[in-house]
Image (cartoon, rainbow, N blue to C red):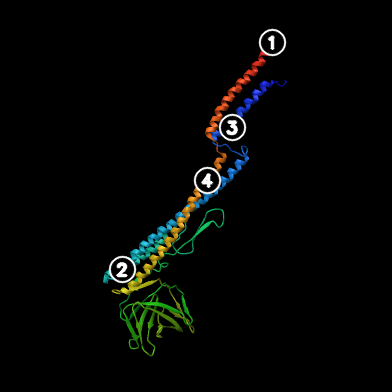
């Protein structure tokens, strides 16, 4: 079958109509998708520029989520610090009450104090957010990356606001037994040693002032798990123990400590071992920190209050530091959010279609299509008039 031959006028009208139909299809696609550039075929330059922007926006969106979680982690730590500060203020109030209490009330307040102190450690242990705890001891670091640059990050180190970290000790009523001398002491680790001449232990005497001399014999000193006997060996023959005074006990020779005044303090407790032939004393058991307080003894209670005041200062400093980190993280979070919006907006400008413009284009193209159909009809009528000559 021979090919159909079209006249030049018909072919021109047909090609114009096909072009108009293609434009209508493209415009309808833009209106339905909202995109002027939906693939590299439409506009390679705009497509790949937009892809670069949207890829970067995606990367920063992931960073934004991590920053948001870091804000929550540090906020949880600050909440914990505020709660610990509240507990320490309560402890300080109880300690103030100890100064004027006696008998059963004194004992009850000591129990209340120690119960409150134990809550500090329980609270700090609970202040964990997604496995990170920034207040329950040092060693953890919250690292937050802000971009793909290795230096663009913030590291927040954990702090120790546990009872031991704040040096908040349990309190114990000082013994009133005749011949008993109580010393407040810091935490003692099992296996700790004093070795070599000159090693020292510093202890603070809490109790009534008294004098030890050769005629009064041996006075027992309680130091955590250590019990030692004080005996006077100097020629002068007397040592004074003054309430609130810190005494340095210095290792002098095998099996003995010596005070600053030169008085020898012989170790008699089974909880302390002395290496044979050496100047080493080993603590056989660990001891938690304890602060001795005595009834109607404001000096011993004032020592506790001073430690609590120091703890409050430390807590406020740590809270301020973490608060600065939260402010920085929030600033980066706000910037990242704005930056992501800018990147996405830039990519959209390169690919999005103008709906109003495309709507007007569609209306114009539909009109052109109708005119093209009419033009094709007119061209066909011209050929049909030639056919009339053969009738």
Residue 219, given in percent of the width and then of the height, sits at 35, 82
Label 3: how many Cα within 10 Å (few below 14, some 14–19, many 20+): some
Label 4 secondary element: helix
Answer whether residue 329 is visible to the viewer in this image. yes
Do residues under tags 4 and 3 come within 8 Å of each other at their CB atoms?
no
Taking the image as shown, residue 32 lies to the left or right of residue 306, namely right
Q: Which residue is mark 1?
A: 389
Q: CA distance from mark 3 to mark 2?
A: 84 Å
Q: Which mark is residue 96?
A: 2
Q: Nearer the viewer, residue 270 or 146?
A: 146
Label 3 secondary element: helix
Q: Which-is-in-front pick, marks 4 and 2?
A: 4
Label 1 secondary element: helix
Q: Which-is-in-front pick, marks 4 and 3?
A: 4
Label 4: how many Cα within 10 Å (few below 14, some 14–19, many 20+): some
Taking the image as shown, residue 338 lies to the left or right of residue 101, namely right
Against 219, residue 298 (above or below) is above
Q: Which-is-in-front pick, marks 1 and 4?
A: 4
Q: Which residue is mark 3?
A: 26
Quarter of the figure with the N terminus:
top right
Q: Which mark is residue 342?
A: 4
- Which of the two labelled residues, at mark 2 and mark 1, occupies the earlier sequence position? 2
Q: What residue appears at the point 57 percent right and 45 percent down from the top-left corner? A: 53
Label 2 secondary element: helix
Q: CA distance from mark 4 to mark 3?
A: 28 Å
- Which of the two labelled residues, at mark 3 and mark 2, occupies the earlier sequence position? 3
Q: Nearer the viewer, residue 121 or 373?
A: 373
Q: What residue appears at the point 59 percent right and 22 percent down from the top-left corner? A: 371
- Which of the two labelled residues, at mark 4 and mark 3, occupies the earlier sequence position? 3
Label 2: how many Cα within 10 Å (few below 14, some 14–19, many 20+): some
- Which of the two labelled residues, at mark 3 and mark 1, occupies the earlier sequence position? 3
């Amino acid at each position: 079958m021979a090919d159909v031959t079209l006249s030049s006028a018909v072919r021109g009208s047909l090609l114009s109509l096909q072009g108009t139909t293609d434009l209508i299809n493209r415009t309808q696609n833009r209106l339905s998708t909202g995109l002027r550039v939906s693939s590299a075929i439409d506009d390679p330059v705009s497509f790949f520029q937009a892809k670069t922007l949207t890829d970067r926006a995606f990367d920063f969106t992931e960073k934004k989520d991590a920053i948001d979680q870091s804000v929550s982690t540090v906020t949880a730590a600050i909440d914990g610090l505020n709660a610990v500060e509240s507990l320490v203020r309560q402890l300080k109030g109880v300690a103030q009450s100890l100064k004027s209490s006696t008998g059963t009330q004194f004992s009850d307040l000591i129990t209340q104090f120690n119960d409150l102190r134990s809550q500090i450690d329980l609270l700090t242990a609970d202040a964990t957010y997604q496995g990170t705890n920034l207040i329950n001891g040092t060693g953890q670091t919250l690292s937050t990356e802000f971009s793909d640059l290795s230096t663009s990050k913030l590291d927040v180190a954990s702090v120790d606001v546990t009872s031991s970290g704040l040096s908040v000790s349990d309190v114990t009523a000082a013994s009133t037994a005749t011949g008993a001398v109580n010393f407040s002491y810091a935490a003692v680790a099992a296996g700790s040693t004093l070795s070599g001449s000159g090693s020292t232990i510093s202890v603070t005497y809490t109790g009534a002032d008294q004098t030890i001399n050769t005629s009064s014999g041996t006075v027992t000193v309680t130091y955590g798990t250590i019990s030692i006997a004080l005996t006077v060996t100097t020629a002068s023959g007397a040592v004074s123990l003054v309430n609130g005074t810190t005494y340095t006990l210095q290792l002098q020779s095998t099996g003995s400590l010596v005070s600053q005044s030169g008085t020898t303090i012989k170790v008699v407790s089974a909880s302390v071992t002395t290496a044979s032939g050496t100047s080493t004393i080993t603590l056989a058991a660990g001891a938690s920190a304890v602060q001795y307080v005595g009834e109607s003894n404001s000096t011993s209670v004032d020592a506790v209050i001073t430690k609590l005041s120091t703890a409050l200062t430390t807590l406020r400093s740590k809270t301020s530091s973490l608060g600065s980190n939260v402010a920085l993280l929030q600033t980066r979070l706000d910037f990242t959010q704005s930056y992501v919006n800018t990147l996405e907006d830039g990519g959209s400008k390169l690919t999005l279609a103008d709906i109003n413009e495309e709507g007007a284009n569609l209306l114009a193209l539909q009109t052109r299509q109708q005119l093209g159909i009419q033009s094709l009809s007119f061209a066909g009528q011209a050929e049909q008039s030639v056919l009339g000559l053969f009738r």
